Image (cartoon, rainbow, N blue to C red):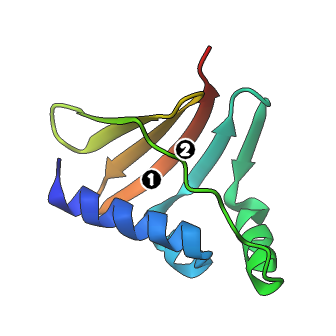
Amino acid sequence: MDKQLEQTRDAWMNAFYTGNVQQMAQYEDAAFKVIYEHQGVVETNLNRYEMIQHAVDNGVWKPHKPEIQSEAFEFDRENTQCRVTSEMEKMRIHELWNDDDGWKVMELRFSQLK
């Protein structure tokens, strides 16, 4: 795996779990979205940061860390795009990363396994 992607991804995940929206914004593309396929919901950054900050300010930001059973990294030929697939018991998470002068996450997609 690309060392820079690994470091960026770790920092982004840490920012999410600690509720540091300023740091999250550094690692997320301006058009970043979270897709919950099973609910038909798409979240954008329009009010996502405000909702997270509100939860942090009120002491209720406690995101669940999933128990990852497997993880796969697929890079394109130029090593400028990577799809990370993580699988849990009942769910799959896809992350789409793009390296355009530094890695940024473009999409986070949750889907249920059958």
User: Mark 2 belongs to which amino acid?
Assistant: Leu
10 Å crowding of disc 1: few (<14), some (14-19), many (20+) = many
For the point 79% across and 31% down, the residue is: 39
Label 1 belongs to which residue?
105
For the point 53% across and 44% down, the residue is: 107
- Is residue 101 among the parts visible in the rendering? no
Residue positioned most to the top: 114
Image location of residue 53, percent across then percent down? 74, 78
Query: Across the whole image, how many numbered discs are drawn on residues?
Result: 2
Q: Secondary structure at mark 1?
A: strand
Report the side of 59 relative to 92 (left or right): right
Q: Secondary structure at mark 2?
A: strand
- Is residue 88 among the parts visible in the rendering? yes
Image location of residue 85, percent across then percent down? 40, 34
Q: Are marks 2 and 1 in contact (CB under 8 Å)?
A: yes
Image location of residue 1, percent across then percent down? 17, 47
User: Mark 1 belongs to which amino acid?
Assistant: Val
Q: Foreground residue, 76 or 69?
A: 69
Q: Foreground residue, 30 or 108?
A: 108
Q: CA distance from mark 2 to mark 1?
A: 8 Å
10 Å crowding of disc 2: few (<14), some (14-19), many (20+) = many
Task: Please state, as top left, top right, bottom left or bottom right, where the C terminus lies in the image.
Answer: top right
Label 2 belongs to which residue?
108
* Residue 76 found in image quarter: top left
